[in-house]
Image (cartoon, rainbow, N blue to C red):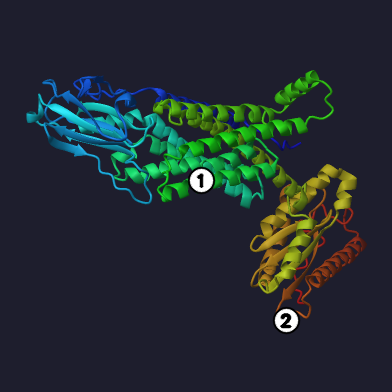
Amino acid sequence: MKKIFTKTEFNLTTVYIMILFSFIAAIGFYLSFNIKKNLSVAADAIDFSKQWHSEDSNNITFNPLTIDNEHFNTKSPTIIYKKLDSNVKPGYSLCFRAHNTHITGYIEDKEIFSTTFKKDLFSCNSTGSMWYFYQIKEEDIGKNVELHIKPFYNDSSCSLSNMTITDDYKFILEYMLSQAFPLFSCMFMFAFAIIFTIYGVYLKHYRQDNNTVFLYLGYFSALLAIWSVLETQVLELFIDASQLLQFINNAIIYLLILPGILSISTIFRIKNQRALNILCIFSQISFVIALLLHFTNIADLHISLPLCHGTIGICIASLVLIVIKEKRENKTNLETAASWFKNVQNNIFSNPKTMVVRIVGISLISIAIVTDIIYFYLGHSSANGSYLRFAIICLIVYCAYLSLDYFLQIHSELEHTSFVKQLAYHDGLTGANNRTAFQERIDYLQNNLEENPRIGIVMIDLNGLKFVNDNYGHNEGDQFILSVVDILKKTFTESCELYRIGGDEFAIIIVAPNPEAIFKISSLQLKNNIQNHNNFFRKNYSVSLASGVAFYNRNTSTSHNLQDIIDYADKEMYNDKNAAKKAKVIYNNLNAKTLQGFDRNKNESIYPLNTNEIDE
């Protein structure tokens, strides 16, 4: 018996490898965003972030990621100094990144660099992230570096970081290497975004599956990947468009809310569509408000981030409440809390893909988002969205597992469908097309006679099957039928289709420009093949066939109904069979040695195939 639903060890191994690979990538991505990097690109590189002092001689140290905001304000620039000691090599560069900070540098009243800010429609009220590289000259050694610093905002996003004196090319290379894990994880998310999108389109348009989770998750993963790339500030090293990149960065945070709601609601099977619609509309209204505030110069997208965070918080709380409410509504016939808890346990262990994922998944994402928002307002910019990215990657890994599992199910279903179709349209014994397939083919040709102007139909009957079954058993009868099918397949090849339409009845459809010629050649070859078969096997019975043929010609046929052609061919087949019976009677009257109409010694069939062309 054929085993229909199978999952091989290879498929399971693939799942395990993919999950392990994704988990390692997620951990590396998470750690890389939370480790404070103090770049030292060479043995003689100098950390230039310490021992700065202000005009009143207060010592100021740049944290590798943020400025100590007690010394800085947005109203007037703060001036700080540091001397270029003799250990600084001429030719090396002062390298650092300024984020949302206006900065001008001097060496003894000579300006060495300055922030350029130009407000336009698609930019916030800051420069975003800008990289600075000043090549130190020999005459600069021993002089003071003077920085005039003015933050654009009163929050932790304003920062100076990675301040190092080293070779600028090595600095860029080292920074790129330090962002290898984040960039790799972004590529990982973007790859899954493409896979999910293609897979979602395939399910929707080719499988007629209304489950849109992969489309939503693909859109969400793509936005998250783009946002994560922007958060690394790598693009600013190569593109002079820091203000536009900052605008896109902040806009994507708003845009993430809608696909996030749709993905989570679909994955966790939230049924309250009305509440989901309200949340989706609410998220879009908040984005529209933020854009209006931005374009009217009331508050740019960065300043309105609390509106975005508030929207996210409301959506998270609402989704949690919806899940809890739906869980209570689904609770039926439960009298006590103990029985309810036992039922939850049973559901978790019996159906982990629904209960565990809904509870753990939405909790994981909620905690990650809330943690990131708290870190943002506490001034820990090093954790910018890292917890959310970690949670989303875990979710993507799980969905990748689900998609692969679903793919394996589809593959099994296709195998099952193919097997059922094989049974529905093919003969179980011979593998030839059956009567159902024959009738559907005739119906198709009948409806498309304009495209098929010449058709030949051959009706064939196997002589002596009952004799073989009665005298040698049905197994031998089956071998008899298989031998005939093998002969017919080898004979009728070009533009011919073989069908077994009954126990000992066969039909051949010839669709070709000249079916008469094909039949004439094939019928002659058939006689030779039957003789060769009988000579080779030399059984107590011989293969013998009766046949009739009729042809349809759009230009000459009086009837355009293919059933009339079939009836005519069938009639000719019975005429051929009756003629063979008469020949048998004559043969018996001559006292020839026969066995139920079969000649054991004679090489050719007593009932020869009628090869005359029969015009309609």
**Picture mark count:** 2
Classify residue 93 as left or right of residue 242: left
- Residue in view at x 48 percent, y 27 percent: 374
Classify residue 270 as left or right of residue 610: left
**Residue 586, quarter of picture:** bottom right
Classify residue 21 as left or right of residue 91: right
- Residue in view at x 18 percent, y 31 percent: 93
Q: Amino acid at mark 1?
A: Phe
The answer to whether any part of residue 221 appears in the image is: yes
The answer to whether any part of residue 21 appears in the image is: no
Q: Nearer the viewer, mark 1 or mark 2?
A: 1
Frontmost residue, 603 versus 2: 2
Looking at the image, residue 442 lies above or below residue 220 = below
Q: Which mark is residue 417?
A: none
Q: Which residue is mark 2?
A: 556
Instruction: Choose the circle earlier in sequence order: 1 or 2.
Output: 1
Q: Position of residue 313 (x, y in %)?
A: 56, 34
**Helix, strand or loop for disc 2:** loop
**Helix, strand or loop for disc 1:** helix
Q: Which mark is residue 287?
A: 1
| Cα–Cα gap, marks 1 and 2 | 73 Å
Q: Amino acid at mark 2?
A: Thr
Q: Quadrant for the C terminus, please.
A: bottom right
Question: Counting other residues with Cα less than 10 Å from the Cα at mark 1, is it few (<14), some (14-19), or many (20 or more)?
Answer: many
Q: Position of residue 613 (x, y in %)?
A: 74, 73
Q: Position of residue 493 (x, y in %)?
A: 65, 60
**Residue 439, quarter of picture:** bottom right
Question: Counting other residues with Cα less than 10 Å from the Cα at mark 2, is it few (<14), some (14-19), or many (20 or more)?
Answer: few
Q: Position of residue 1 (x, y in %)?
A: 76, 36
Classify residue 292 as left or right of residue 322: left
- Residue in view at x 13 percent, y 25 percent: 89
